[in-house]
Amino acid sequence: MFTGRRNVLLLAFSQAMMLSVVVMSVSLGAILGAVLAPDKGLATLPIAMMVIGTALASLPAAILMRHHGRRAGFLTGASLGVTGSLLCALALAKSSFVLFAIGHLLLGSYQGFANYYRFAAVEATDPKHASRAISWVVAGGVLAAFAGPQLGQWGRGWAVSGPFVGSYLTQAALSLIALALISQVRLKPVAVAQGGEARPLRQLLALPALQASILGSAIGYAVMVMVMTATPLAMLGSGLTGSEGTPVIQWHVVGMFAPSFFTGSLVQRYGAPRVMGAGFALLLGHVTIALSGIEFLHFLSALILLGVGWNFVFIGGTALLTQTYLPAEQLKVQAVNEFAVFGLVALATLSAGWLYDRFGWITLNLSVVPLLAVALLSTAAIGRRLRLLEESV
């Protein structure tokens, strides 16, 4: 495979545990939020709080890892996952919407720390295998696709204190497993000083490739999360049952992570911009299917395409990002990327419930088309620019 395999595999399984927690929260958060919220327009607020937590944690996570190492940061994140899951269980037992939202904020903070797993995998292996290392860690989500929704439904009646309390207790157990896995990871200290002096952040942000990477990743992730968050509500509003929503989210997550087994090879062969461009084309294809009907198969096929498109954009964007900075600049650039991506994702998630409640499923999907068009054009432009640079060398 490549050097650093043990660390990459541990990070991949830790990713699977974290994403199982996230997927379970996404599949249940909006539905339970609609039950607990004083206003149905706030149904997706817990999911939005989770994304806000991810964005807010991204910068402190980078600072903590800079001074104390990757593993210390990852252990902190998993501890937040345990705490957030237990708080959500308590909120359901007490029927408290406020506590439920705060619990999801902590769960999002867990993801904010864990999002650095993919960068740690790059540091654990040879540069020529970077895109494959990213892919293998992201592929940990394949397990989450099945474990997250299924454990959420199985845990519905496990606790006598209320429905789905057991689901969030299961989340706490998954976070504890992640703690155990991360404790076995052995990574070199974060190389802040090696590779020469770091360029000023303003100069880095002026790099076209860095701009295209951050813009593309942010738009791709925001579109995916906004549509995914509103899908359970749209299915219920279309007369489908909550149990029918579980396989849709499940196969959507499969679409998000299963391509990871070959996306890294595609990036190596065709380049990150082309893979990102293919991802944006697939996301536009999702819109076409979503607008064609509201039967179960429409939701299922559209969400699978949404997941595959996100995978291409996310892995391609991450691979492109790692090509833009020196080792001395890595944490600075990574922190800015995570904050920008999840800041936009938070705005998209906050708007999902409101857009669906006020304007409906069709308008929500149409609203993402201009964003995807801008990202597709930006990615195509940087792809041409990089090809010209290669030809001139």
Image: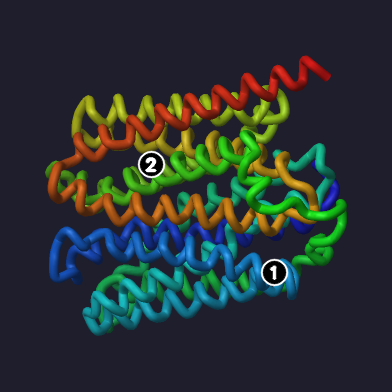
- Give the quadrant of residue 294: top left
SS state under label 1: helix
Say left or right for 20 vs 196. left
Camera-nearest residue between 311 and 151: 311
**Residue depicted at 45% across the width and 60% down the height:** 22
Say left or right for 389 vs 221. right
**Residue depicted at 24% across the width and 36% down the height:** 296
**Category of crowding for the residue at label 1, using alpha-carbon neighbours closer than 10 angstroms: few (below 14), some (14–19), many (at least 20):** some
Mark 2 belongs to which amino acid? Val
**Residue depicted at 19% across the width and 47% down the height:** 356
Earlier-in-chain disc, 1 versus 2? 1
> Where residue 12 is drawn, which disc sits there?
none
Q: Percent from the top left, x then y, of residue 31?
A: 24, 60
Q: What is the CA distance from the residue labelled 1 to the residue labelled 2?
A: 29 Å
Mark 1 belongs to which amino acid? Met
Say left or right for 307 vs 115. left
- Give the quadrant of residue 126: top right
Q: Percent from the top left, x then y, of residue 300?
A: 32, 36
**Residue depicted at 26% across the width and 32% down the height:** 366
Identify the residue position indicated by label 2 in the image: 223
Q: Percent from the top left, x then y, of residue 121?
A: 73, 53
**Category of crowding for the residue at label 2, using alpha-carbon neighbours closer than 10 angstroms: few (below 14), some (14–19), many (at least 20):** many
Identify the residue position indicated by label 1 in the image: 65
Q: Is residue 90 visible?
A: yes
SS state under label 2: helix
Q: Is residue 158 visible?
A: no
Quarter occupied by the C terminus: top right
Quarter occupied by the N terminus: top right
